[in-house]
Amino acid sequence: MICPKCGQQATYIEQYDRDYCYFCKAYVPLRPEPLGVKAVFGKAFNLLKKKPLFFIIALIPLLLNLVLSFGLSISINQFMTPMQSLVFDPSVDSLLSILYSVMIPLIIFSGSSLIVYSIINNAYLIGVKRVLKGKGLNLTKVFKKSFKRLGKYLASSLILIFILLIPIVFTLLFYAPSFILRPFITFFLVILFSYTPAIIVLEQKSIRDSFRYAWRLGLKNLGKTIKFFILTFLIIITLGVMFSFIPRPFSEYVALLTLNPLLGVAFSVLYLNGIKQLQLA
């Protein structure tokens, strides 16, 4: 059993039929409370050490990034020729040539990235739940279930983007005071609806019920969620400084292979063992 206070592995004491944490020097409660933010990251580190397959999941967006970046660079090089012809011959054909060589690759790049990262996020949630239940990290089953949840995940993501655009529209309508408040309103909305993807993927709920449930969870766990995002920001900054000493583009690859699994697993643990009062392992 994992200690809910520190996130370290507890030791079972057969004599007393209890689990004892030598790090906290105390017995683990019979009905453990939800993990704190520090324990969430501690447990995430332990899961990554025990299940390195989580790093394999991070290879997929890395390979996608390499392929699409290469394709986009070719499109930009091809863009220069019609751009020059447009300057000397501003015709409809030249304009269409620019649109085909730049806009279509950008649309493909954006759409592919959205789909792949949605699948990856689903995979972390499903994979962590399987590991916590003791089922093992079977990537075939994880990705199969991830694809099944893809449609609802993408739909909820688009709705979430629309909700986050509300402060921007509000700013345009009432510029003066709301311009200062916009970052705070957006951050508050992100906190309140941050658990929507996890609910969509892991719970048998409709999109409408998922947003309602996420709103309740966000309000109930506002302080813990803010602490999680602050600690996440500090980790990104710290690793960013460390990776800055690595030559590009290798620093970007190392960042993808490190941050994606760490933050994906940590958020999954936060929802499963930190927000939901549930101990799965």
Image (spheres, rainbow, N blue to C red):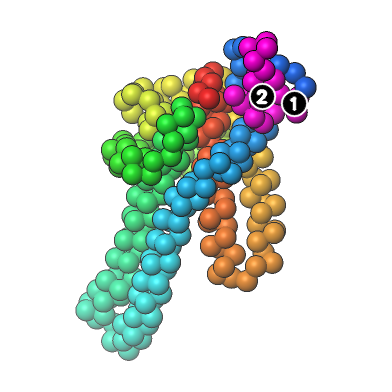
Q: Is residue 3 magenta?
A: yes
- Mark 1 or mark 2: whose residue is earlier in sequence: 2
Q: Residue at x 30, y 73 (%)?
A: 101
Mark 1 vs mark 2, CA separation in Å: 8 Å
Residue on which disc 1 sits:
22
The location of residue 14, given as percent across then percent down, is 64, 15
Q: Residue at x 66, y 25 (%)?
A: 10
Crowdedness of circle 2 by 10 Å Cα count: few (<14), some, many (20+)?
Answer: some
Q: Which mark is residue 11?
A: 2
| 39 versus 108 height, above or below | above
Looking at the image, which is closer to me, 100 or 38? 38
**In the drawing, does residue 80 fall left or right of residue 247?**
left
**Residue that lies at the very extreme toward the right in this rendered image:** 25
Which stretch did the figure color magenta?
1-24
Kindly identify the amino acid type of the residue bearing the numbered disc 2.
Thr
The location of residue 179, given as percent across then percent down, is 58, 43
Q: Answer yes or no: is residue 219 visible.
A: no
